[in-house]
Image: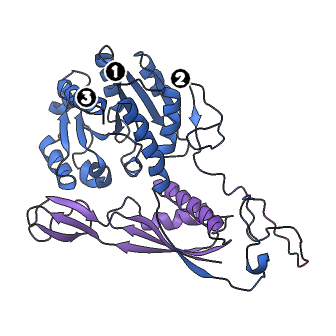
Chain colours: A blue, B purple
Amino acid sequence: MCTVCGCGRPDMPAGKDSHDHDHHHDHGHGHSHDHDHDHDHDHDHHHHHGHGHDHLDFGGGLGGVHVPGLSQARVVRIEQDILAENNRYADGNRRLLAERGVFAVNLMSGPGAGKTTLLVRTLEDLRDHFPLSVIEGDQRTDVDAERVRATGAPAVQVNTGKGCHLDGHMVGHALEHLDPAAGGILFIENVGNLVCPAAFDLGEASKAVLVSVTDGEDKPIKYPDMFAAASVMIVSKVDLLPHVPFDVDRCVEFARRINPSVEVLRLSATTGEGLADWYAWLERGRQAAAEPA
Amino acid sequence: MHEMALCESVLAVLEREAQSQSFHRVKTVWLEIGALSCAAPEAMTFCFRAVTRGTLAENATLEIVRTPGRAWCMDCSDTVTVGERYDPCPLCGGYQLQVTGGDELRIKELEVA
């Protein structure tokens, strides 16, 4: 039984897991009653729009009886943020991480910008200094979590199935199984996608977006939501700069048009160039998270 | 296509409200989608139809209310209207803008029965 939300999902095995988590409610699995029947039912028989929500009272019209043709239309003001549900889960994650003093970084980029390569190198370089753990998000496969576990860091793979991003609920489940150690860093590697993950708060302390020099330098203005959400932009694969026409300064200028306060790091996980700045950035975040609130 | 997930969240709210406010059918949903929000109105309309099929909101009309992007220009010390996040300040042409509005993603009202 899920203790994050009570969704009834059985526990997933820690470590290796293809968490094919449909975090949504089971709507749309209808039994539809297309037959017309004019006779009165003395039991609740929901014959309007067949769906399996037994908890909904479809006989809730005047006098508890639905009368076809009698309009009971009314306007209800509700004023609810569409992301409120996700944000509730994210707030829960953030509370848990704050209690533990764990610094959580949400790593985002398009596919192939080098998130996993940077992550693996970082885990290898920092694993002797403090506890590190990883949540890996991908549509399918356990490949990335396997690469991460090879470094010795605990990792939970979340497969989003048809989903194009991690959300607060999925990360809540992953945290239950990962149990990140106090005073450490949790890396959440989001699904490779420069659009959708921007909208979903996971409860992380910082969002980091990678742009590789083999991408176009105009990525920030093409995908403004992502760069507006990020607190740091990492220009990756800078060892390839002599071979590609990528203009780093122009990329930074574009990013700061979207987000004037975004920090910028330039690095290569292959040669190690710029990694010291990245580790210093992580250490600042880790220390801030470890301080008692 | 995160609009699918957003529409599933909308449906979850409708189902919850149906219980608490005793309605069984949703005829119209008014959504406020800011110009600087992460949702594309056309995609929301498409996904809403797909997600609500066979539910209490099947065939409901989705009315999208667009709100303009608003930002504070640090150089002008003034609030300005922007169409996109990468737009410059319409007054000074600079980019020292902080978004102050127009990133809403809200359900405003429902017409229910």
Comes first in the chain, label 2 or label 1: 2
Determine the residue positioned at 28% across, 29% down. A286
- Classify mark 3: helix, strand or loop: helix
Q: Is residue A41 magenta?
A: yes
Residue A73 lies, in percent from the top left, at 63, 82
Amino acid at dot 1? Leu
Residue A2 lies, in percent from the top left, at 61, 38
For the question of whether residue A191 can be seen, the reply is no
Amino acid at dot 3? Gln
B69 versus A281 height, above or below: below
**Mark 1, residue position:** A123
| Circle 3 chain | A
Q: Is residue A97 magenta?
A: no
Residue A250 lies, in percent from the top left, at 14, 47
Q: Are the residues tagged 3 and 2 within 8 Å (C-beta)? A: no
- Classify mark 2: helix, strand or loop: loop
**Mark 2, residue position:** A15
Q: Which residues are magenta?
A: A30-42
In this rendering, would A221 be left or right of A144?
A: left
Q: Quadrant of the C terminus of chain B?
A: bottom right
Determine the residue positioned at 60% across, 30% down. A12
| Circle 1 chain | A
**Farthest-out residue, right:** A39
**Mark 3, residue position:** A287
